[in-house]
Image (spheres, grey):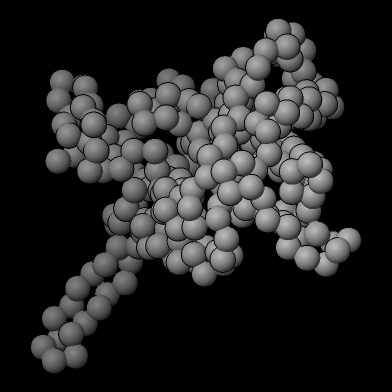
Amino acid sequence: MPELADIFRQYGPEYLNRYGDRMPDSHKKAVWDIIRCRTEMTGGHVYVCEDCGHPQYSYHSCRNRHCPKCMNDRTEKWLEKQKESLLPTGYFLITFTFPRELRNVTRSNQKLMYTILFRCSAQSLKKLAADRRFVGAMIGFTSVLHTWRRDMLYHPHVHCIVPAGGYDTARNQWNPSNKKFFVPVEALSVIFRAKVRDELKKTDHFGRIPRSVWKKDWVVHSKPVGDGNHVLEYAAPYVYRVAISNNRIKSLKDDMVTFT
């Protein structure tokens, strides 16, 4: 079966030649890193058997987080560390999604827009959770960025893994939330939309956004997810693994790639 590196080696240079001036530097670096990964271009180490003296040469990996060969070990270590930090309470998965009208600006200004996505989703959650009608406490959570759907279409959103409660600093106690309800997503989406709008007003990109987007409903989704273990396993691949793994690529034939 072909691998992503095989496809990049065959078609990457021509693609970069044609579209490279329109691609983020991080994308171009990922292509070249994956092309070189575990080849003579990265160098390597020689291992010698102490008994028979047989040498074996091992090429270095690229360690780019987008390389399907390099990130599995780091994913497992991240998952183990996160599970050790779980609190003895229920958890919620709360997802904030940028609407379609923001995707062109986001793709062209990823560092800025992903920072805004993380910051505004976090601020919105903290603001509403502090309300005594809901949690009335200071909350903590883990946020994971996801930028694609399974069909490889661009779809930037952030998953927040949130304990069902928070620390009430005024009363020095843990305030549990409702087991089935954390905060109202309708109000959360309104706050999120307003905070993103305010952040974008500070940039040169605000005028590129259609005015209608500030009046439409934004998508924020919330659901209880048990003790948090399952949702961490769901999120872990997004932290260190690529959009498409090698085992999803089924064929490379007549300049066409088939993948599941």
Give percent across and percent down for residue 237. Answer: 41, 49
Give percent across and percent down for residue 248. Answer: 24, 38
State how many labels appear: 0
- Residue furthest toward the left? 52
Residue at x 33%, y 66% (from the top left corner): 44
**Quadrant occupied by the N terminus:** top left
Q: Answer with left or right where residue 119 lies relative to residue 146.
A: right
The front one of 130 and 33 is: 130
Q: In this rendering, does residue 28 appear at all?
A: yes
**Quadrant occupied by the C terminus:** top left
Q: Answer with left or right where residue 226 lies relative to residue 216.
A: left
Give percent across and percent down for residue 53. Answer: 15, 86
Q: Is residue 157 above or below residue 213?
A: below
Q: Answer with left or right where residue 7 lies relative to residue 118.
A: left
Residue at x 42%, y 30% (from the top left corner): 149
Residue at x 15%, y 20% (from the top left corner): 254
Q: Answer with left or right where residue 122 lies relative to residue 42.
A: right
Give percent across and percent down for residue 103. Answer: 58, 21
Residue at x 78%, y 25% (from the top left corner): 194
Q: In this rendering, does residue 5 appear at all?
A: no
- Residue furthest toward the right? 170
The front one of 35 and 120 is: 120
